[in-house]
Amino acid sequence: MPGPPQGTSAEPPRPRRRRDRAGGDSRATLALVLGLVSLFCLGPLVGVPAVLVGKAEMNAIKAGNAPPSGMPMAQWGFYLGIAGTVLSIAGCLVFTLVHNVPGFLR
């Protein structure tokens, strides 16, 4: 009985897993940095990507495709991205009301 063709193995390929590093994961770090930047400048421009990257990384960690050490950074990035986006939108609304509605603060 012939075996598998040369150059292939009988076993299916294993899914690649990231190595667990002491500093967490680069996508979790990216989410955290974007979340922090969204609080101080650029608001939704980096807040929305922080939410998306943070949530994707949290899902990858739960699925076992990313190291669990990155979970706190991914969560912080996710929540800071939401906060930065909401605060920026609220600030824009207040600015618009103050400057365009006569007697708003009087």
Image: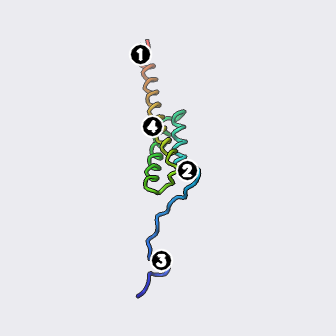
Which residue shows up at 53% across the image and 42% down it?
A: 32
Which amino acid, mark 1?
A: Phe
Q: CA distance from mark 1 to mark 2?
A: 48 Å
Residue 54 image point, x, y percent: 47, 45
Residue nearest the observer in this picture, 9 or 64:
64
Quarter of the C terminus within the rendering: top left
Q: Tell which circle, 2 or 3, labels the residue nearer the N-terminal end.
A: 3
Residue nearest the observer in this picture, 102 or 1:
1
Q: Residues within 10 Å of mark 1 (few under 14, many from 20)?
A: few
Which amino acid, mark 2?
A: Gly
Give the answer, above or below, for where 81 lies relative to 93. Answer: below
Which amino acid, mark 4?
A: Ile
Q: Which residue is mark 2?
A: 24
Residue 55 image point, x, y percent: 44, 46
Q: Which residue is mark 1?
A: 104
Q: CA distance from mark 4 to mark 1?
A: 28 Å
Q: Which residue is mark 3?
A: 8
Q: Nearer the viewer, mark 3 or mark 1?
A: 3
Q: Residues within 10 Å of mark 4 (few under 14, many from 20)?
A: many
Residue 49 image point, x, y percent: 47, 43
Q: Nearer the viewer, mark 4 or mark 1?
A: 4
Which residue shows up at 55% across the image and 46% down it?
A: 29
Q: CA distance from mark 4 to mark 2?
A: 22 Å
Which amino acid, mark 3?
A: Thr
- Secondary structure beneath dot 4 equals helix
Is the residue under label 1 in contact with that under label 3 (CB below 8 Å)? no
Q: CA distance from mark 2 to mark 3?
A: 34 Å
Quarter of the N terminus within the rendering: bottom left
Q: Nearer the viewer, mark 2 or mark 3?
A: 2
